[in-house]
Amino acid sequence: MKSVQWHDTHITILNQQALPHKTEYLELKNIKDVWDAIVTLKVRGAPAIGMTAAYGLALAAQSYETDDLATFHAQLKHDRDYLASSRPTAVNLFWALDRLVKSVANATSVNEAKTTLIHEAICIQIEDEDVCRRIGEHALSLFQDGDRIMTICNAGAIATARYGTALAPFHLAKEKGITLHAYACETRPVLQGARLTAWELSEAGVDVTLITDNMAAQTMKAKHISAVIVGADRIAANGDTANKIGTFGLAILAKAFNIPFYVAAPLSTIDLQTKTGDDIPIEERAKEEVTHIGGVRIAPDVNVYNPAFDVTPHELITGIITEKGIIFGDYETKLPTLFEEVLA
Ligand code: MRU
């Protein structure tokens, strides 16, 4: 089941807003459709947002009616900025868009640039599958048969090209005949844990138990949770990590219970330009996400604070699991070394 797929005239996405009731694919036919799908969370999760935006930019560029490279680059920059305005926190969005723009910097014709953009976007998706598998293998080395592991939001196959980041070890364990028990926090306000993670893991035959977010402490204690693993939307240079709202709370609880707390993310989620978590822009979303559930009002019309993400300080993170391996502490020194080979 692919979260996003390129077709020559359009992009299809799995509509994550319709899950788990309906498995529905939507056709995105122009850049506005792509922007809208990202803003309304029909496609979500940092790597999937990046892939979709990359395809969206490649799609938009196909309709530019110019043979002049300077005009082409100006239009591309305009559309890059438009797609970049869809969501502020997940750095994969900007990473993917900038990678596409860079890929055509030396193009010698508009036609060549148009083809290159499609190729680059497809590469991002192909690479992401491999990256997620590697993250899963590294993560799996931390766990043992029978472990009970808590997670939040959906950092799964549908948030990436395949396997997911935080959910990759569950999928790989299943493939290898190892039993891992997932405890999924429902993840208010928009319930990515209940609607998406519980669905994705149960569909894959992984043992998953759903809890509401306020049951985390009791569950850690009563069910002897062995570890917490979460995804990330942006990891700052010092290791501070933005992820779905509620992640920070889980990290504090994990510390209180002496449970290891892991962040699983690709290098494309690490933003060395952002020094600390205080510099990460935190998206605030519509109040209706809190006052309503599934379109039904559950609260009076009062003031609402609805941050979509929080930042877990690096001191609370036991290890960051990437496709290049796992780093434990001293993130400020170790994170840049992950890029050495990439930059060489
Ligand atoms: O608002 P969302 O659903 O896009 O938030 C997603 C998360 O916070 C995920 O944990 C993160 O993007 C990692 S997805 C592999």
Image (cartoon, rainbow, N blue to C red):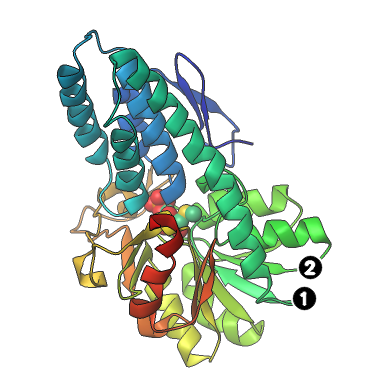
Query: Is 78 placed left or right of 111 in the picture?
Result: left
Quadrant containing the C terminus in the rendered view: bottom left
Q: Nearer the viewer, residue 69 or 62?
A: 69
Q: Which residue position is annotated with label 2?
A: 179
Quarter of the rendered structure image containing ligand 1: bottom left
Give the residue displayed 59% in from the left and 35% down from the top: 2
Which residue is drawn at the image coordinates 23% and 70% (left, top)?
275
Q: Is mark 2 within 8 Å of ligand 1?
A: no
Mark 1: which amino acid? Gly
Task: Label 2, secondary structure: give it.
Answer: loop
Looking at the picture, which amino acid does disc 2 mark? Thr
Lateral position of residue 96 relative to residue 195, left or right: left
In this rendering, the answer to whether 143 lies above or below 72 is below
Q: Quadrant of residue 227?
A: bottom right
Query: Residue tagged by mark 1?
Result: 146
Residue found 37% across the figure and 49% down from its top? 92
Q: Is residue 258 above or below residue 311?
A: below
Q: Are marks 2 and 1 in contact (CB under 8 Å)?
A: yes
